[in-house]
Each structure stands twice: as C-alpha cells, then as structure tokens.
Amino acid sequence: MTAPALAIDIGGTKLAAGLVDPDGRVLAHGRVATPAAGPTTDAETLWRALEGLLAEYDGPALAGVGVGCGGPMVWPAAEVSPLNIPAWRGFPLRARLRARFPGLPVRVHNDAVCVAVGEHWRGAGRGHVDVLGMVVSTGVGGGLILGGRLIDGAGGNAGHIGHVVVDPVGPPCECGGRGCLEAIARGPGLVAWALAAGWRPDRVEPTGADLTADARRGDPVAVAALRRAGRALGVAIASATHLCDFGVIAVGGGLSQAGALLFDPLAEAFDEHARMDFARRARIVPAELGQTAGLVGAAALIHVPERYWNPS
C-alpha cells in the first residue's frame, strides 16, 4: 500500500485533517476551530465545517479514511455523541464519510484511542508492548495497547480513563458522575476552578493555555490548579497501571504542554499510590508526536489494521 490515508481528528476545540503515508509521516495537514456550541450550532453546522476542511484533500488517490472523534460512540458504526460536542448526539459520522468517500474504507475510533495508537506506532510507545496513551485537553481520554494490539472493549469504548473516579465527593462531571478525572483535570474545568479560587486573568474568556502561561509566571492560583490536575492524573494512572501492568504511559494533549507544572505533581501522586513493584517500573513520559498524534493514529487504522482495527 503506497497511497496516503486521509486522517481526521475531531475534538471539542479543533477539527484537523491531513495526509499520512504508510510509514506514519504526515505529508500535509490543516485545522479549523470546532464551531462553538450555541443556538445556531446544530449537527449540520458541524458537518459543513468538517466538509470545508476535507475539501482541501480532494484529488489524490487515498488508501482510506481514518478518523478519531470524541466519544462515547456506538462502535464500529461510529454513531458519535461526543461529550464536548453537544450538537452531535447519535450523529452517523461513519455513514456520512462513506457517502463522501465512496469505495474507500472508512474507520472511526475514539480520538484519545487514536492518540494512543499514534504514540504506540510512531511515538513515545514505539517498541513497547503494553502502553497507555492519554490526552489531557478539553476532555481527558485514553487508549489501551496490550500485547502489542489495541484493546477495544465490548463496545469499542475501552480506555475512558477520564471517567475513572479519583475523588468520590469531587465535582460533577459531564458524564453525569462525580469526581471523575475529567471533571478535575480537563482544561475548561481547571479554568473554572481557578477563577472560583481567585485567578484574575487578562482575557475575558481565558483558556487552559492562559492558565498555564500565568502558572509559568508564578501565579499561585494557576500553579495550584495545575498541581490539582497533575495529582488527579497521577492517582488515575496508578490505578490503571495496577490493573493493566503498562510499561509506558504517554501523556499528550494541550494541557500536557504545561510540562513540569503538571508532570511533577503527577509523578508525586503516582509514586504515592503505585505501591506494587511492577507498577512502579512503569515510565510516564510526554507524548512525542504533539498535535499530529491523533492524525497519525487515525491513519494507522487504515495502514496497520492488523494491530489497530479489530471490530468483531
């Protein structure tokens, strides 16, 4: 197979697409902002925004279309209901893409799963058999590679580490639960917590990137917010590692760009809670592929299906 795959990455903040060759090299890519939720943003508005992005890649021969999209979803049919994209509830994403690209294989998985696949195939988990890949951004998600193969779970939703409970009396989560990792560590949740704790950013509508920038300047509330997120991540990763015996945990996503401000408290909490010797051997590392990890992983669904595409 020599033709590139068209890779698509759909998240609550951005829509991205690009061409990825069979060796995992991103040949071209682009992105646009995900239309903001509002009274005029419906399912078709989102679809038109995605179609406009995909029009840039019409023309070259393609091996197929691989997609990472926020979940949960009915899998492998990919009727998607992303928690952070409220306009899509049961949206038939795979069917729409198959109609848009007739005759090509179209494979859709969770966006965080695709990041995990990308990091295992060509990033920080390359050469390792048992890997947890994570995204910490608008949401918190993950994917499981065990025995060198992607683990899908009974309904294709394995890896939702963002909904591991790290504080039973913690804040409510968009999923309807309470104290989920995502409720504490997702970017918008951190911003809300920091504002309530007295953070006074320069922007009217601050983001996680603004919070990180102020933490780097020493703002005590911003530093405390990232520490809170890091510790929650460390607790969740310790629990997951005891369950699955990972060799490597690769952490990516926009919030991971905070570096030591996030990773130091993460490591501290992991060391406190990972008490079994086998768990303590796991390495927690920043994801290597950056903002293209989801595209590389989505392409792997097409280029390396024997490892990463296993619908029953």
Image (cartoon, grey):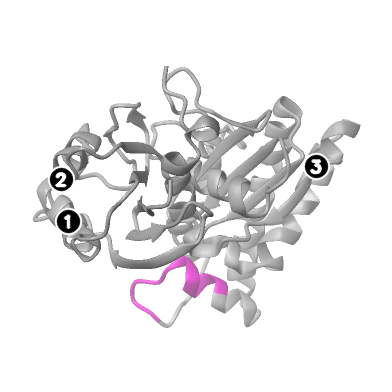
Callout 1 amino acid: Glu
Q: Residue at x 71, y 25 (%)?
A: 243
- Who comes first in sequence, dot 1 or dot 3? 1
Above-or-below relation of 176 to 49: above
Kindly identify which numbered label has been placed on residue 51.
1
Q: Residue 219: percent from the left, percent from the top?
A: 61, 77
Q: Is residue 283 above or below residue 144?
A: below
Residue that mark 3 sits on? 282
In the picture of the structure, the residue carrying the numbered disc 2 is: 100
Labels 3 and 2: the sequence-earlier one: 2
Under circle 3, the secondary element is: loop
- Is residue 205 a member of the stretch shown in magenta? yes
Q: Nearer the viewer, residue 49 or 83?
A: 49
Circles 2 and 1: CB distance less than 8 Å? yes
Could you tell me which secondary element the residue under label 1 belongs to?
A: helix
**Nearer mark to the viewer, of 2 and 1:** 2
Q: How busy is the neighbourhood of tag 1: few (under 14 within 10 Å), some, or many (20 plus)?
A: few
Question: Does the image show residue 199?
Answer: no
User: Is the N terminus in the top left, top right, bottom left or bottom right quadrant?
Assistant: top left
